[in-house]
Image (cartoon, rainbow, N blue to C red):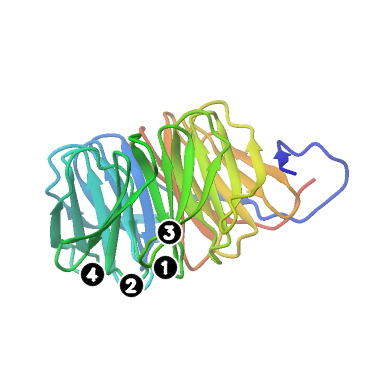
């Protein structure tokens, strides 16, 4: 039975990880920031201004390290490989660009055809996955050749994608509300199809152990799924508008979501509670959240062109 997780109103005390703001970068882009990823000591952002930037975060300081130019229309998604310093970006110009995060240089540009939205990278940086009309395309990140096409069984656009930390599974969210999980080895079998959203899925994320998938939708809800079976575990309700970004903490004990209602929420998965609403995070739609892989902090981005960084504070809650 699925649980409905709403704002905690119970009596008593429990332990939960809470966050406080520690750093902000205003005007980080010339346009709204549409996506964010964090890896190898860098926050990577993409924007409607067509640029990709990388930033170093040290305490209260956020400093730009590289500007990664070249897209000719707004950037819709960015991803960072877990094991190598490689990033990928997708944009409305129908191109995927693969970057060396150490140098800020372009490794490869892939012309992926129309309707390219979500992008994901395998942990080793060897495979790029990108959403398109009717499914997901896989590309070799070294040669740019297409290696596979994974069909969702309809002609609807896949808006978001994620690859599990072990590289074994891929999750895709579509504009019809479907969430699909595929194996990342040939024949790329679809192992689960989840249908709890009636409208577009805007974000998907895997827990670190790859056992659960989180989806966020235009229905203002986020849903937690068992990846292997597609069984619905929890429904997270509380946002007042579209859920545009979602991320798991490193230990899988909690998730954060962001929304076009301009807020960021922190959900404790041990107690089944929304333990914190960071209501003053952004002055416009909040489009993305990403955890520092080393744990202890996360960042959010939005149409207000700001990057916000939050660090864990003393655990607790009532």
The residue mark sitting in front, 2 or 3, is: 3
Whole-number angstrom distance, CA of label 2 to CA of label 4: 15 Å
| Residue at left offset 71%, top offset 36% | 7
Tell which circle, 3 or 1, labels the residue nearer the N-terminal end: 1
Q: Contact, CB < 8 Å: mark 2 with mark 4?
A: no
Image quarter of residue 195: top right
The residue mark sitting in front, 4 or 3, is: 3
Secondary structure state at the residue bearing disc 3? loop
Disc 2: which residue: 124
Disc 3: which residue: 189
Secondary structure state at the residue bearing disc 2? loop
Q: Is residue 281 visible?
A: no
Of 204 and 35, the residue lying toward us: 204
Whole-number angstrom distance, CA of label 4 to CA of label 3: 35 Å
Q: 262 above or below 110?
A: above
Whole-number angstrom distance, CA of label 2 to CA of label 1: 8 Å
Numbered circle sitting on residue 102: 4
Numbered circle sitting on residue 167: 1
Q: Position of residue 75 (x, y in %)?
A: 24, 42
Of 242 and 66, the residue lying toward us: 242
Q: Contact, CB < 8 Å: mark 2 with mark 1?
A: yes
**Picture quarter with the C terminus:** top right
Q: 198 above or below 38?
A: above
| Residue at left offset 25%, top offset 42% | 116
């Amino acid at each position: 039975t699925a649980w409905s997780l709403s704002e905690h109103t119970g009596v008593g005390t429990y332990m939960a990880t809470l966050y406080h703001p520690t750093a902000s970068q205003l005007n980080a882009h010339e346009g709204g920031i549409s996506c964010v990823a964090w890896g190898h000591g860098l926050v990577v952002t993409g924007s409607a201004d067509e640029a990709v930037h990388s930033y170093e975060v040290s305490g209260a300081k956020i400093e730009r390290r590289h500007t990664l130019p070249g897209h000719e229309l707004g950037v819709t998604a960015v991803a960072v490989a877990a094991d190598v310093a490689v990033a990928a970006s997708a944009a409305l110009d129908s191109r995927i660009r693969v970057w060396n995060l150490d140098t800020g240089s372009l490794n490869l540009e892939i012309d992926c055809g129309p309707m390219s939205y979500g992008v994901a990278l395998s942990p080793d940086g060897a495979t790029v996955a990108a959403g398109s009309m009717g499914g997901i395309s896989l590309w070799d990140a070294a040669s740019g050749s297409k290696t596979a096409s994974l069909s969702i069984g309809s002609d609807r656009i896949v808006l978001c994608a994620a690859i599990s930390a072990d590289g074994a599974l891929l999750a895709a969210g579509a504009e019809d509300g479907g969430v699909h999980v595929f194996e990342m080895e040939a024949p790329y079998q679809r192992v689960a199809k989840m249908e709890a959203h009636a409208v577009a899925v805007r974000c998907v994320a895997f827990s670190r152990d790859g056992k659960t998938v989180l989806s966020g939708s235009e229905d203002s809800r986020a849903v937690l799924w068992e990846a292997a079976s597609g069984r619905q575990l929890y429904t997270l309700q509380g946002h007042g508008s579209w859920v545009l970004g979602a991320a798991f903490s490193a230990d899988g004990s909690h998730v954060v979501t962001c929304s076009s209602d301009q807020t960021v929420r922190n959900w404790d998965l041990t107690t089944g509670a929304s333990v914190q609403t960071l209501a003053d995070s952004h002055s416009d739609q909040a489009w993305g959240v990403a955890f520092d892989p080393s744990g202890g902090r996360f960042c959010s981005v939005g149409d207000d062109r700001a990057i916000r960084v939050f660090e864990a504070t003393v655990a607790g809650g009532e």
